[in-house]
Amino acid sequence: MVRRKKRMETKNLADSTASERELRRLNDVWANAFANRLGTDVLPNERVRRRFISFVLTEQTNERLTEKYILNQFPKFINYLAEL
C-alpha cells in the first residue's frame, strides 16, 4: 500500500504522459546512481527526487529513457538547481 501511494505521488508531480515503466526506470536509476555509483548510504530527500524526475521528463525530446540518458541528466539537473 505504501508503494502504491509513492507511485501515485510521483505520477502526479511528473509529466502525466510518463508511463509507469518510465517512472520505474527513473526511480531505479536515481537510487542506483547514489547507492552503487556514488557509494552513498543516504539519498537526497523526496522533494529533490521528484524534481529530478520532472526535470528529466521535461527535458526529454525523442530520446528513450535509457540508463545512460538519465545519468547524463544529473549534471544538467545540478546546474539547473544552481540557477534557481
Image (cartoon, helix red, strand yellow):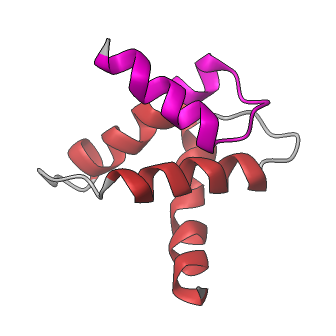
Q: Nearer the viewer, residue 12 or 14?
A: 12
> Which residue of the protein is positioned furthest toward the bottom in this rendering?
83
The image shows residue 11 at horizontal and vertical percentages of 60, 31
For the N terminus, give its image quadrant.
top left
Foreground residue, 47 or 31?
A: 47
Give the magenta range. Answer: 2-24
Residue at x 48%, y 25% (from the top left corner): 7
Residue at position x 35%, y 47% from top? 33
73 and 24: which one is in front? 24
Residue 21, relative to residue 33: is it above or below?
above
Q: Please name the residue shown 69% across and 21% down the image.
A: 19
> Quadrant location of the C terminus?
bottom right
Residue located at (57% from left, 79% from top): 79
Position of residue 74 measured from the top left corner of the image (x, y, whole percent)? 51, 61
Answer left or right for 25 relative to 34.
right
Q: Is residue 44 above or below residue 12?
A: below
The residue sitting at the top extreme is 1
